[in-house]
Image (cartoon, helix red, strand yellow):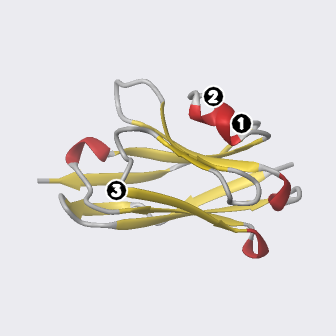
Amino acid sequence: QVHLVESGGGWVQAGGSLRLSCVASGRSFGRYAMGWFRQAPGKEREFVASISWSGATTYYADSVKGRFTISRDNAKNTMYLQMNSLKPEDSAVYHCSQGPQAYEMSLNSPGDYWGQGTQVTVSL
C-alpha cells in the first residue's frame, strides 16, 4: 500500500512563497513519476507540475510556469514544490500523486495514488 503525505501548506500574502513537500512510502519511490495537482472549491482538478522518476524531465501548467519549481530527492522519498510569486488564484488544496509517467500527469491524469492534500491560501 502506497501512502503519500503532503505538508507545507498555509496562508500567505500575494507575492509570497511556500514550499510543499510530499513524502511517499510503500514502494520504490525512485521508480515512479510524481506530480502535483490542485483543486479549489467549485472548480475542476487542475494539473500543476510533474517530474520523471529520475528528476530529469519536468512539466508545468502554463499558469505556474516560471513561478513554481518541482523537484525530488529519491534518497529521502520526497518530492517538493517551491511556489514563488503566489497569487490569490493559486489558492487550492494541493495533492501529490504517484504514477508511471510524468507526461501522462501533465495531461491532467493523476497517477495510481493520491495524497490527502494540503491547503494553500493566498490573500491580497
Residue that carries the numbered disc 1 in the rendered image: 111
Name the N-terminal-most of marks 3 and 2: 3
Residue that carries the numbered disc 3 in the rendered image: 67
Residue 100 location, quadrant? top right
Q: Kindly identify the residue that appears in the image at 31 percent across and 45 percent down.
A: 90
Rate crowding at label 2 as few (under 14), some (14 to 19) or many (20 or more) other CA atoms within 10 Å.
some
Q: Nearer the viewer, residue 81 or 121?
A: 81
Residue that carries the numbered disc 2 in the rendered image: 109
Of all residues shown, which one is farthest toward the bottom? Answer: 75
Give the amino acid at mark 2.
Ser
Is 93 on the left or on the right of 41, as rendered?
Answer: right
Observer-side mark, 3 or 1, equals: 3
Distance from the alpha carbon under mark 1 to that under mark 2: 7 Å
Distance from the alpha carbon under mark 3 to that under mark 2: 22 Å
Name the N-terminal-most of marks 3 and 1: 3
Asked if the residue at tag 2 contacts the one at tag 1, i.e. Cβ–Cβ closer than 8 Å, the answer is yes
Give the amino acid at mark 1.
Gly
